[in-house]
Amino acid sequence: MKKNVVKIVIAAICIVLVAGVCLTCFTVVKAGHTGVVLTFGAVEENVFEEGLHFKMPLVQTVVQMNNRTQKVETEGSASSKDLQIISYVVAVNYHVRSEASASLYQNVGKDYGTVIIVPAIQESIKAVTAQFTAEELITKRQTVGDQIKEALSEKINSYGIEVEIFNIVNFDFSEEFNAAVEAKQTAQQQALKAEQDLVRIEVEAKQKIAQAEAEAESIRLIQEALAKSPDYVDYVKWNKWDGKLPEVMGSDGVLVDVGDLAE
């Protein structure tokens, strides 16, 4: 009886061991990842795509490398072409190419964001901002961002990392520079207002000249008409009369109610 019990226990242990070994023969690579295969710690060139795969138990291990879009945000400071200090916050979307996963893990490891990407971002920003004045960094922000993205891509593409989107979240300048920009904008606005006032004055002056010329021309025409016909004054007088007689007329100190005469 005891021998049978021992045999049963041994058989159960063997089954558990075999089942455990069988389970270690398979690995599942998650969606959006690749499996970097290590044989006795050495990185294999070929990687596992997402899904179920067989591996040699106790000999091989699989490290999951993320190939989805990832985001890193960093901040720091740099200098412009005119030696203004800029504080920046930028965000970068990137992904690791599947075929480069094994090489990246072998040469850098899984902490490639801190080891490669962030330093490359900082270096690229400093290299590009040094080519623009502080004012140009504001007015040509899109161009600056595109050049930083291009410089960053050149630095990290060789590691199998693709830059998808580069965003300048914020550029901050010193208080002195901000004050100078505000003063310049105020001066420009005042100059524009002065220019607009000058144009308005010129227009008004031209209008007055045109009005004066028109009045002078009218007087000239009247004078010509008077010279040709003395009756022109009567014509103008009767042309402007509204048809109503004055209510009171006087002559030699006598006042007469014209209204009574009309009745």
Image (cartoon, rainbow, N blue to C red):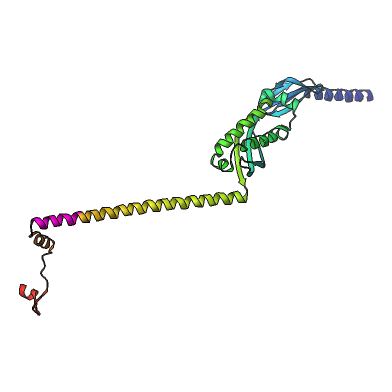
Q: Classify 234 as above or below 50.
A: below
Residue 78: x %, y % from top left: 66, 41
Residue at horizontal 5 percent and vertical 74 percent from the top: 261
| Screen quadrant of the N terminus | top right
Numbered range of the magenta stretch: 217-228
**Residue at the (39%, 52%) spot, across then down:** 198
The residue depicted at 55 percent of the width and 37 percent of the height is: 142
Query: Seen from this angle, which residue lies furthest bottom?
Result: 253
Does the magenta-highlighted stretch encompass residue 55? Answer: no
Residue 204 in which image quadrant = bottom left
- The question of residue 227 being in magenta is answered with yes
| Closer to us: 116 or 81 | 81
Query: Residue 208 at x, y = what percent?
Result: 29, 55
The image shows residue 192, relative to residue 252, as above or below, that is above
- Number of marks: 0
Q: Is residue 4 above or below residue 183?
A: above
Q: Position of residue 14 (x, y in %)?
A: 86, 22
Q: Is residue 263 visible?
A: no
Q: Is residue 193 left or right of residue 44?
A: left
Look at the magenta stretch and give its main secondary structure: helix
Residue 44 visible? The answer is yes
Work out which residue is located at the far right of the displayed protein and give it: 2
Q: Nearer the viewer, residue 6 or 146?
A: 146
- The structure residue drawn at horizontal position 55% and vertical position 36%, both measured from the top left corner, is 143
Q: Position of residue 257 (x, y in %)?
A: 9, 76
Could you tell whether 130 is left or right of 211 in the image? right
Q: Is residue 247 left or right of residue 54?
A: left
Q: Quadrant of residue 130?
A: top right
Q: Nearer the viewer, residue 17 or 172?
A: 172
Q: Is residue 223 above or below residue 259?
A: above
The quarter of the picture where the C terminus appears is bottom left
